Structures are given as C-alpha cells and as structure tokens.
Image: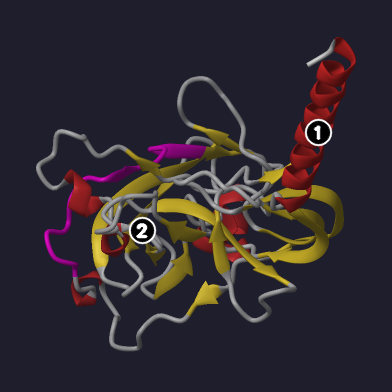
Amino acid sequence: MNTKDFFGILLMAMFAVVGLTACSNDDEPKDSVKEIRMQISAETGVMYAWGDDKKENPIECMLVMSEDNPGVWEPLGFGKIEGFTYERGHEYYLSVRRTILANPPADASDRTYSLIRILEDRVVTEPEVPVDEEITSEEDIEYHDLCPFEKYATSKGYIVDANGKIFYDDGYGSSLPSYDNARIWLEDVLDKGDPNWVKFESVPYMAMYSFVLSPFTDDIRLVSNGSHGPMFKDVVPEDEFTRIQSMQSGEEVRYALILANVYKKGLQKLEFTIKKQ
C-alpha cells in the first residue's frame, strides 16, 4: 500500500468516526424544559426521604399544585425551587421553569424547578378551628397514646408594653413582630435518646392544633398551629390583648396550651405568662 492510499483510508476512517459520534449525540435523550404556573399553599405538608419505606421520619415540606396536575396538592421540599424562598403563612402563584431530566439520579426526582417570577404573594390568616361542643373543660380533652409527653417547648413568658409591643421575657428584651404577625413558636426538644423517639416524630405525635386555656374565660378554643406554632393573636384575641395592655405594671396572667395532633387528641400541656411592662 502506498502512502497516498494509506492516508486516504485513514481519512475515511476519521470521517466515519465523526459521523457515528454525531449520530450518537443526536440519538441521546434530552432534558425537557417548559415554563409552567405553580401554586404554593400557605399550609405546609409532610414528605419522606428516599428509602424511608415505613414512613417513620416525616419531613415538613411545601404543598404545590402545578398546571400539569391540576387539583392535586403534591409535596415539594423547601429550597427545591431555585431562586425562591418560601415563607410560612404565604400563598404564592409562581411562574417557574420546569426541567424534566432525561437522565435523573437514581435516588432523586426526575425534575427540577427554578423561579422565573412571582405572580402573586398573599398572606393568609390562619382561621380559628371550631372546638368539639363536648369539650367544655380541660378534663374533656382526650390524650393520644403514650401522651402526655415532653416533646415541645416554648417561651415561658412574654412582656407587653402600653403600645402593644411584645417582648420575650427572657432577660434579653428581644421583641416579637407586631401583634398581627407574632407567632408562639414551638420547639421540638425531644431527646433523641428516648426509646420512642422515632415513633414520637411520626404524624400522630405532631402538634397540629392547640386547645387554648385562657385566664379571661372558661371557654376552650381550638386554633391551628400552622408550621411551627399558633399565631399570637389566635391564642390571645384582640379583646384579651386590650385587657392585658390596660393591666397595672408588673401584673401578669397565665395561659396554657394543650397541644393536639391532627385527630385533635392531646399531646402535652404548655404554660406561659404574659406580663404588663
């Protein structure tokens, strides 16, 4: 074979390889990208990690409804919409870029989302939940299995000044947001060494509601806890808050919350004071 023939064959082989590579790239599946509308609920939901087949470790998440699956609220983790920060108590209507991955990871979703723009952002007031007419006293509240137990904690006290500003009675003087936006935060303080820790982290042991025991009335109200605790104004309605503002300096009142699960069965009792500055 002469040199001319050799280089001719080599050139043809190179063209063949390039051609095969081009065909291979054209045949590879590609990601599907589409702009869609998505609604985000003011309420949060619960989801479970990959591999948690027994659903023993619920994870709080967003609830979303997309235009390609109308009428169905689906769980989506916080931070799963790139460029979007969810705030509890807000209902959103978004334009997002949805990417369906051609080759998704084995242990993850086949789609990703990124924010294009927020079309609507609305603050939703958490409504008061009607209490069972048969519950007229603390003794009428039925506790759930293994309850009461010490899973949650909250601030032991609050201070209110004459202008209606609310402070933590913690020695640091840190303030809460306005009366309309303040929340009584519930902190999960359950020791992971507890033999029932896994069970206590399941949905039946989550504080979805609070029975409010007020120093100003014998009536028991049931309020929603939202994501991390009830709104201050739901626990201390405006007429009671006005009475607290009119108290003498140093005078205090004591409230109690009986936390309850989704079935409105008691979990534990928390008490806190509100003092007039």
Q: Amino acid at mark 2?
A: Ala
The secondary structure that most of the magenta stretch takes on is loop
Horizontal and vertical percent for residue 28?
Answer: 70, 49
Asked whether, in this view, residue 69 is left or right of residue 135, the answer is right
| Residue 243 in sight | no
Q: Amino acid at mark 1?
A: Val
> Could one spot residue 16 in this view of the protein?
yes
- The segment highlighted magenta reads 143-158
Most extreme residue toward the top, as rendered? 3
The residue carrying mark 2 is: 207
Q: 222 and 63: which one is in front?
A: 63
Q: Using residue 275 as the reference point, say whether residue 266 is left or right of it.
A: left
Q: Nearer the viewer, residue 277 or 158?
A: 158
**Cα–Cα gap, marks 2 and 1:** 63 Å
Q: Quadrant of the N terminus?
A: top right
- Identify the mark at residue 38; answer none if there is no mark: none
Residue 93 quadrant = bottom right
| SS at badge 1 | helix
Q: Is residue 147 magenta?
A: yes
**Closer to the eye: label 2 or 1:** 1
Q: Quadrant of residue 210?
A: bottom left
